[in-house]
Image (cartoon, coloured by chain):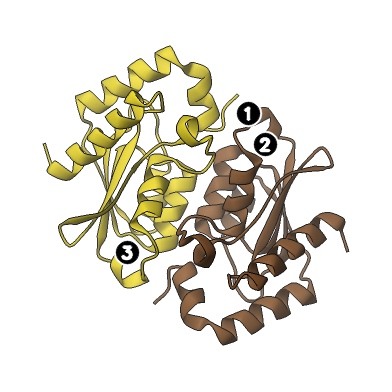
Chain colours: A yellow, B brown
Amino acid sequence: MDPFMQAAIDEAKQGLAEGGIPIGSVIVHRGQIIGRGHNRRVQQGSAVLHGEMDALENAGRQPASVYAESVLYTTLSPCAMCSGAILLYGIPKVIIGENQTFLGEELLLRGRGVDVQVVQDASCVEMMRSFIANSPELWNEDIGET
Amino acid sequence: MDPFMQAAIDEAKQGLAEGGIPIGSVIVHRGQIIGRGHNRRVQQGSAVLHGEMDALENAGRQPASVYAESVLYTTLSPCAMCSGAILLYGIPKVIIGENQTFLGEELLLRGRGVDVQVVQDASCVEMMRSFIANSPELWNEDIGET
């Protein structure tokens, strides 16, 4: 396992242990993690801190030159909000744990020139499958579905 | 002036008074403001709390049915991140103060069926023009530019 994807999975597991939605993310700049995070909907009552957003927030204010050399790892295909954040900051590469339980805006990202790679990791799929089966209403809230 | 756009402008002015980036937003559900906010980059060291995101965060966790009946007001054309959040939550209508100093992802929003209206308010234009002239580096950081 890529150690950065493992770090994103560890974030997701920490979120689950906190009673939250198990999606994690890390942002890597020149081989170093500069921000890590996980979904905070339950823990902070947050509507904007998806895993990727939390990692961006925890990376703090950065100049465009840092984002331009960064890779974002996320356990799940990024939704429209998180994909938009990737585009805003010009992050050129995104490594995704899986897109079987939720397919985000990968086409939009690729269409704007982002290098999008999907690992399709079985443990990421199982983590989300189990969570969605147990908490369908919470999951729907997180992705803006009825 | 539409009172909801005025409320968004008031948020932007509050942000400016705090030493921040003067962009404000409110979310209106059935004629009531359910969330209001302004850019928090300077005040909170935030990379994700643009005005629209701050308004979404302050509206708190909401079901899709609430977003589906909401209108988002923002003083400035929404960037990719904020537009993505609008798409994630299925907000059907966005009223924009101006898009002369920054043109966000209005085409993407319209292409996905969002009703986008631009007021082109002179006071919104002047507020951003003055801010960008005074703080070009801060502004570039906020929109991911070098």
> Residue at image x 44%, y 71%?
B141
Question: Image height check: is A142 above or below B93?
Answer: above
The quadrant in which the N terminus of chain A is found is top left
Secondary structure found at label 3 = helix
How many residues crowd mark 2 within 10 Å: few (<14), some (14–19), many (20+)?
Answer: many
- Answer left or right for A133 relative to B125: left
2 and 1 marks on the same chain:
yes
The chain holding disc 3 is A
The chain holding disc 2 is B
The chain holding disc 1 is B
Asked whether B15 or A30 is in front, the reply is: B15
Question: Image height check: is B112 above or below B136?
Answer: above
Residue type at mark 1: give it. Pro
Which residue, given by chain and number where applicable, does mark 2 sit on? B67
Which residue, given by chain and number where applicable, does mark 3 sit on? A67
In three-dimensional space, the C-alpha distance between marks 3 and 1, rounded to whole angstroms, equals 32 Å
- Answer left or right for A18 relative to B49: left
Which residue, given by chain and number where applicable, does mark 1 sit on? B63
> Residue at image x 62%, y 69%?
B18
Residue type at mark 2: give it. Tyr
In three-dimensional space, the C-alpha distance between marks 2 and 1, rounded to whole angstroms, equals 7 Å
Whether residues under marks 2 and 1 lie with C-beta atoms below 8 angstroms apart, the answer is yes
Question: Image height check: is A18 above or below B96?
Answer: above
Residue B136's label in the rendered image is: none
Residue type at mark 3: give it. Tyr
Whether residues under marks 3 and 1 lie with C-beta atoms below 8 angstroms apart, the answer is no
- Percent coordinates x, y for residue A119 in the rendering: 21, 37
- Percent coordinates x, y for residue A31 in the rendering: 15, 57
The quadrant in which the C terminus of chain A is found is top right
